[in-house]
């Protein structure tokens, strides 16, 4: 291996590390408000998210319509933390993108359940709640972090 090949390989390794690190920064659930825009771009949504302030002012809902017609809502606390995500539409969104680090937790939980791979997910843990169901052209779901719900917000507020 000559000097140029070695230099090129080092540059490639550094570039790959940066790309992989940037992908991790897009995690939404548990991420900061900047991840909402990163998700919109990643999922090819043409229009910016529509913002709705809660009646209490303790959180904002960022609603994005994906090219597939699926609506994704990301709930952001006043402190700037994404504490919940919901989806509703003809196709499931990229759950790996939306759930970020919690996607692996959901998959690990499913692995221990009977009927893995069926269309219904119901996971209620102290640190993560995931509910998802659907069939062809009709999917609905939500995921949230119970410990991060703002004061005065209940799970019924996450629609």
Image (cartoon, grey):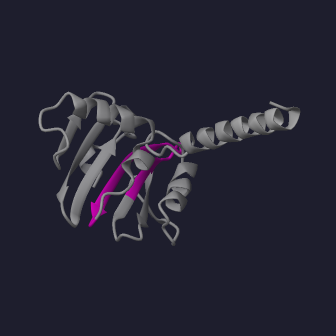
User: Where residue 46 appears, x then y in whole percent?
Assistant: 51, 72
Q: Quadrant of residue 103?
A: top left
Horizontal side of residue 7 vs 92, given as left or right: right
Q: Quadrant of the C terminus?
A: bottom left
Q: Nearer the viewer, residue 48 or 40?
A: 40
Most common SS among magenta residues: strand
Point out the image quarter for the N terminus.
top right
Instruction: In this rendered view, identify the residue nearer to me: 158 or 4.
Output: 4
User: Which of the pair 89/62 is nearer the observer?
Assistant: 89
Where residue 33 sits: x, y (%)?
54, 49
Asked if residue 75 is among those painted magenta in the image, a careful observer would answer yes
Does residue 18 appear in the picture of this structure? yes
Q: How many numbered circles does the render carry?
A: 0
Outermost right residue? 3
Q: Position of residue 80 (x, y in %)?
A: 53, 45
The residue that appears at 41% across and 45% down in the rendered structure is 96
Residue lying farthest to the left in this orientation: 114
Q: Is residue 84 above or below residue 49?
A: above
Residue at left 20%, top 43%? 117
Q: Is 87 covered by the magenta stretch?
A: yes
Residue at point 52%, 68% (across, down): 48
Extreme-front residue of the structure? 1
Which residue shows up at 54% across the image and 61% down it? 41
Where's residue 104, x and y in %? 37, 34
Q: Is residue 58 visible?
A: no
Determine whether 57 is above or below 143 in the image.
Answer: below
In magenta, the rendered stretch is 73-90
């Amino acid at each position: 291996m000559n000097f140029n090949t070695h230099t090129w390989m080092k540059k490639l390794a550094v570039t790959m590390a940066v790309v992989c690190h940037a992908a991790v920064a897009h995690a939404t659930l548990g991420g900061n408000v900047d991840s909402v825009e990163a998700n919109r771009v990643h999922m090819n949504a043409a229009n910016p998210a529509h913002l709705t302030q809660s009646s209490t002012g303790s959180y904002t809902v960022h609603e994005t319509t994906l090219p597939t017609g699926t609506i994704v809502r990301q709930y952001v606390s006043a402190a700037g933390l994404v504490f919940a995500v919901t989806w509703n539409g003809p196709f499931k969104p990229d759950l790996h993108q939306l759930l970020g680090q919690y996607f692996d937790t959901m998959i690990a939980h499913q692995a221990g359940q009977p009927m893995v791979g069926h269309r219904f997910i119901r996971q209620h843990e102290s640190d993560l709640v995931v509910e998802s169901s659907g069939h062809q052209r009709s999917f609905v779901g939500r995921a949230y972090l119970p410990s991060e719900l703002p004061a005065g917000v209940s799970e019924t507020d996450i629609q």
